[in-house]
Image: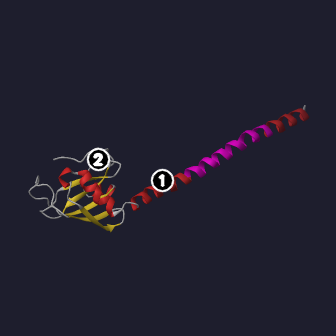
Amino acid sequence: MNETLERLGNELENAVRGQLAPRRRMRKRLAVAAVALAVAVPSVALAAAHFISTEDVAKSLPAGTLSLAGTEPTCRTVTDGVEYSCTLARPPAPEVSDWKGTVEPTVDATKHVNGGCRGLNSAGTKWECYIGQTAVDQQIIGQGFLGQFAPSPGVG
């Protein structure tokens, strides 16, 4: 009887080991994948922010606001991927009498709100623009507006 119980115990132990080994490997693979994902997602977001050019920001101004169409903005980097200082070759449409302090959204090439700008002078030819969450932090656009689809420039 003892020999039978010992053999049964050994077989049971071997069976349990066989069942646990694949689960441990699977857990290890999942843990490695989770770590890789945790590193990759912020890296991609950071890389995307740094790939925005001054030309992209300049195009995003009139794409966000119809009044800025035809103004030919040029921008320079203040903080790469975050803040840009832009100058318009021509003043915006005269819909607003004093552009200083006015805030307008910016829209990227995929037609999504990617940030916003604040008018720095009354003529509306100087703007400080912010990309992503910084535009929300600067109270230029609302959190819920960031990333929204904007098929055409805003009016009014």
Where 52 sits versus 22, above or below?
Answer: below
Where 83 sits versus 22, above or below?
Answer: below
Graded by Cα atoms within 10 Å as few (under 14), some (14 to 19) or many (20 or more), the crowding at tag 1 reads few
42 vs 93, nearest the viewer: 93
Q: Secondary structure at mark 1?
A: helix
Q: Which amino acid type corresponds to the residue marked 1 in the rendered image?
A: Val
Left or right? Give the position of 15 relative to 43: right
Mark number for residue 41? 1
The residue singled out by tag 2 in the image is 145
- Kindly report the secondary structure that dominates the magenta region of the rendered protein: helix
Farthest residue toward the left?
Answer: 97
Q: Which amino acid type corresponds to the residue marked 2 in the rendered image?
A: Phe
Identify the image quadrant of the N terminus: top right
| Residue 47 coordinates in the image, percent (x, y) | 44, 59
| Residue 103 coordinates in the image, percent (x, y) | 20, 55
Real-space CA distance between mark 2 and mark 1, rounded to the nearest whole angstrom? 22 Å
82 vs 138, nearest the viewer: 82
Q: Secondary structure at mark 2?
A: loop
Say which residue appears at 32% left-offset and 61% top-offset: 55
Magenta residues span 14-34
| Residue 151 coordinates in the image, percent (x, y) | 29, 44
| Residue 130 coordinates in the image, percent (x, y) | 29, 60
Say which residue appears at 32% left-offset and 63% top-offset: 54
Left or right? Give the position of 68 relative to 60: left
Left or right? Give the position of 134 relative to 37: left
Where 53 sits versus 106, above or below?
Answer: below
